[in-house]
Amino acid sequence: MIITVNRPISGWEIRILDNGTAGRNKPNPNKLNFLANDRTCKIDGCSNPIRINRTSGLCDTHVEHEHDLLLELRNNGILIGAPSHKDIIDALINWSSSRNFGLLPFFSSLSFNTLGNVPDVSTLAGKTVHTGITPTTIDLIFDELIKVINNFFPLNNNSSYQPLQTSKGEIPAIVLAFTFAGLLICEESNRGDRWFSRIIRKDESKTTQLGAAMPIAYFATRIFPWGVEMNSSARNLTR
Ligand SMILES: [Zn+2]
């Protein structure tokens, strides 16, 4: 299993844990046999045969990841359901527009530091092994994103702690930022193939999945000057 990461902030805890096969396991989108030169399933410990031209490199048993990252949010130890991406973005946009604080550089930095830097869950769990590559770990990735957050939500600034209304009750802005960063890591790892395309295939253009780009696309849609009313239909970019 992937080791649980817990990052506390101001009486809250943001935890990323591996739900294993009890999770909502997603298809593994990586083309592990992209060279089409192997006849054995690429999952560690599996010796099922595959057709040599099966570029997924996965036998029928292993089409889906057997790991699933889940974010948990706690307030003073009590489990609170994490607000959705949409909920968090809506709250942050309302908050920032009242203080003329542009969020675009923040989301842009989160994008740059997340997309392509988060290995898929099977790689993080050691189920797929890539010769010569030691994958990074989610605690290091989370700490990088927290550095981004600290640039935009300074720890010593009262406004970082302003409580914002969400579907899960009032949550401080900086806690929502931590939560959003954690959700990006989960999305990218559970659904993405950008790390594999960039690091293993050495060709990021082979990426087929949006992963964490999906919630960021919702933000981009909310702030883009469309010239038409878009707030309600933008929800189609969330799930
Ligand atoms: Zn297999």
Image: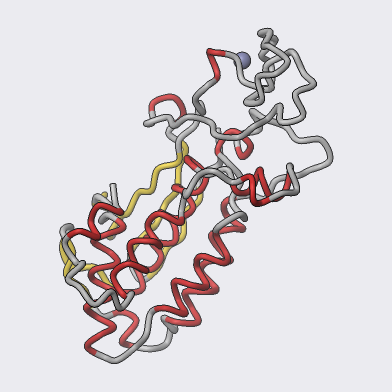
- Furthest toward the bottom, the residue is 100
On the rendered structure, is 120 left or right of 211?
right
Residue 239: x percent and y percent? 28, 46
Q: Quadrant of the N terminus?
A: top right
Q: Is residue 155 above or below residue 214?
A: below
Q: Is residue 71 above or below residue 66?
A: below
Residue 186: x percent and y percent? 45, 48
On the rendered structure, is 199 left or right of 90?
right
Q: Nearer the viewer, residue 193 or 6?
A: 193
- Furthest toward the front, the residue is 227
x 66%, y 32%: residue = 126
- Looking at the rendered structure, the number of numbered marks drawn on it comes to 0
Q: How is the image coloured?
A: secondary structure
x 52%, y 21%: residue = 63
Q: Is residue 172 above or below residue 64?
A: below
On the rendered structure, is 113 left or right of 85?
right
Q: Nearer the viewer, residue 51 or 180?
A: 51
Q: Is residue 23 above or below residue 84?
A: above
Q: Nearer the viewer, residue 70 or 161?
A: 70
Q: Quadrant of ligand 1?
A: top right
x 16%, y 61%: residue = 232
Q: Nearer the viewer, residue 78 or 117?
A: 117
x 77%, y 29%: residue = 35
Residue 53: x percent and y percent? 70, 18
Residue 87: x percent and y percent? 23, 61
Query: Where on the picture, by quarter, is residue 74?
Result: bottom left
